[in-house]
């Protein structure tokens, strides 16, 4: 990755520093974080351990802080060096059964208990998302847990990866409650909820509170837009210029053909005058040619006369069999 931190990592670091003030938002964010980056392990009858893994140190610190704030538990952090791929470290936290993992998972809406039986609930826990601020917190947690956003210099793409189809549908619907157009694509065994429009990504970054990332993205978008507009204008002017050049070449060829075959004597006075001027001033614009006539004629008048000359040339060509 080099020294340059990825845009995704910068965004996550910014969001990791943001700790919600309200308990309801803390719970919602933690629920999404554990759902997206946690694994439930069975530890005997109806006993669970939760293992949470992330490659981002700031995200790991945030999870530890939220677990302490919401549930008063101290979670140990284990760091694994990823020697094989020479990639980032792996940060691992475990909530053991003795720390009340079952209870925590129930409060976070991940485990449901019915008739003394536990089952995993893959949907978004609606009871934690009653307020708009909690919805935003949940999406922030989902992004921190398993989201990424591509460098805007290259392309606009933000995604959240989940292993559950049900959860991906819920995430898509939650994002779209904010008038965005998230879609889902299946990738191997995962479901990817994604946004591809620059302004929608800006909106989502705003919703989850990544304001620095949002400003960076906006600046890059403006530069790209200006560059595109300049290119479009240049292309447009080049196209118009080549149109003008081609038209004037065609006019000159027709006039030279008339002169060579029949001479200008066959042209009426108005047309003869413009034919002579066109030959003499090959670089002149139609407007300039019009001003040289006596009396002066406008651009469309000149165009009209040159068209007439063209038709005369066409007729001669058909007679002479030069078509």
Image (cartoon, rainbow, N blue to C red):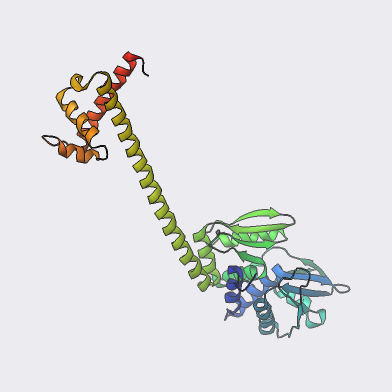
Is 198 placed above or below 20 here? above
Is 231 situated left or right of 96 in this image?
left
In the rendered image, which quarter contains the N terminus? bottom right
- Give percent across and percent down for residue 277: 20, 33
* Residue at the outermost left position: 295
Judging depth in this view, the residue of 279 and 163 nearest the camera is 279
- Give percent across and percent down for residue 147: 64, 66
Judging depth in this view, the residue of 218 and 281 nearest the camera is 281
* Residue at the outermost right position: 44
Is 247 situated left or right of 39 in this image?
left
In the rendered image, which quarter contains the C terminus? top left
Q: Does any portion of residue 85 appear in the rendered image?
A: yes
> Which residue is rendered at x = 82% and y = 82% of the image?
98
Is 56 situated left or right of 258 in this image?
right
- Give percent across and percent down for residue 154: 55, 59
The quadrant holding residue 17 is bottom right
The quadrant holding residue 26 is bottom right
């Amino acid at each position: 990755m080099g020294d340059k931190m990825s845009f995704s990592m910068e965004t996550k670091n910014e969001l990791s520093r943001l700790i919600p003030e309200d308990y309801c938002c803390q719970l919602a964010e933690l629920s999404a974080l554990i759902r997206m980056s946690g694994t439930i392990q069975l530890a005997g009858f109806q006993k669970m351990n939760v293992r949470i893994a992330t490659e981002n140190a700031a995200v790991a610190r945030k999870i530890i802080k939220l677990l302490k704030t919401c549930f008063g538990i101290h979670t140990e952090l284990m760091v694994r060096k990823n020697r094989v791929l020479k990639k980032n470290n792996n940060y691992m936290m475990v909530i053991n059964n003795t720390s009340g993992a079952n209870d925590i998972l129930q409060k976070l809406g991940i485990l449901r208990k019915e008739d003394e039986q536990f089952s995993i609930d893959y949907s978004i826990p609606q009871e934690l998302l009653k307020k708009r601020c909690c919805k935003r917190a949940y999406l922030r947690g989902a992004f921190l847990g398993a989201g990424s956003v591509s460098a805007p210099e290259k392309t606009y793409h933000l995604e959240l990866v989940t292993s559950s189809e049900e959860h991906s549908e819920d995430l898509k619907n939650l994002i779209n409650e904010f008038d965005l157009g998230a879609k889902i694509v299946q990738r191997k065994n995962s479901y990817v909820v994604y946004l591809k429009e620059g302004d929608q990504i800006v909106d989502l970054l705003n919703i989850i509170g990544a304001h620095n990332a949002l400003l960076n993205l906006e600046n890059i978008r403006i530069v790209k837009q200006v560059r595109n507009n300049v290119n479009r204008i240049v292309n447009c002017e080049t196209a118009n210029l080549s149109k003008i050049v081609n038209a004037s070449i065609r006019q000159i060829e027709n006039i030279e053909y008339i002169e060579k075959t029949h001479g200008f004597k066959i042209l009426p006075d108005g047309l003869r005058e413009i034919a002579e001027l066109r030959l003499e001033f090959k670089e002149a614009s139609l407007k300039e040619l019009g001003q040289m006539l006596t009396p002066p004629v406008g651009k469309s008048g000149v165009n009209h006369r040159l068209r007439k000359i063209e038709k005369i040339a066409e007729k001669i060509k058909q007679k002479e069999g030069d078509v």
